Image (cartoon, rainbow, N blue to C red):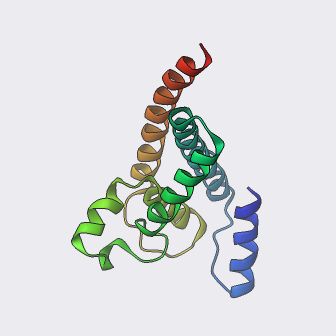
């Protein structure tokens, strides 16, 4: 939430037209919570598999940049080569970024519908949570 607040402040300072309607801000909070749950659960799954902090940090760093660059965080999906478009469409960060853009900006060209963005994040989070619960249960016993 602190990062979102900082992004709002920087956007305002840069003259970006931000949508401050209460339902939009509530949507931003919801997307941040679901996205944080998704990526935290992914990290937990990796931790359960590798079992050491050093490996977790190494694999986490190995995954962070490709996930970021294979999303629409930097450039639109329409400008990506065909093979990267396919990767971006299965990347949950793409849907997180798209949803946040729709909710935060007054005028934007979304890649997907807001409901699609949310459903992809919610379903992916649920699947990852189920996987993490099974893996964590095995580690704890």
**Quadrant where the N terminus is found in the figure:** bottom right
In the image, farthest residue toward the top: 141
Say above or below: 57 vs 129. Answer: below
Classify residue 51 by image quadrant. Answer: top right
- Farthest left residue in view: 82
Residue at 53% over, 38% down: 50
34 lies above or below 130:
below
Q: How many marks?
A: 0
Q: In this view of the protein, which residue sits in the foreground, 66 or 55?
A: 55
Q: Position of residue 108 (x, y in %)?
A: 47, 74
Q: Quadrant of the C terminus?
A: top right
How far from the left and from the top, in percent, is residue 59? 52, 51
Considering only vertical position in the picture, is 135 above or below 104?
Answer: above
Left or right of 76 on screen, residue 9:
right
Q: Is residue 9 left or right of residue 16?
A: right
Q: Nearer the viewer, residue 7 or 140?
A: 140
At a point 26% along the width and 75% down the height, the residue shown is 81
């Amino acid at each position: 939430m602190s990062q979102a607040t900082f992004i709002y402040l920087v956007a305002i300072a840069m003259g970006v037209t931000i949508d401050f309607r209460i339902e939009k801000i509530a949507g931003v909070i919801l997307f941040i919570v679901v996205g944080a749950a998704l990526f935290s659960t992914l990290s937990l799954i990796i931790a359960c598999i590798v079992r050491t902090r050093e490996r977790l940090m190494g694999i986490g760093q190995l995954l962070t940049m490709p996930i970021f660059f294979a999303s629409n965080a930097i450039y639109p999906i329409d400008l990506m080569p065909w093979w990267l478009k396919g990767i971006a469409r299965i990347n949950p960060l793409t849907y997180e970024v798209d949803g946040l853009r729709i909710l935060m900006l007054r005028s934007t060209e979304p890649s997907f519908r807001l409901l699609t963005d949310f459903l992809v994040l919610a379903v992916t989070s649920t699947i990852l949570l189920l996987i993490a619960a099974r893996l964590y249960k095995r580690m704890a016993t």
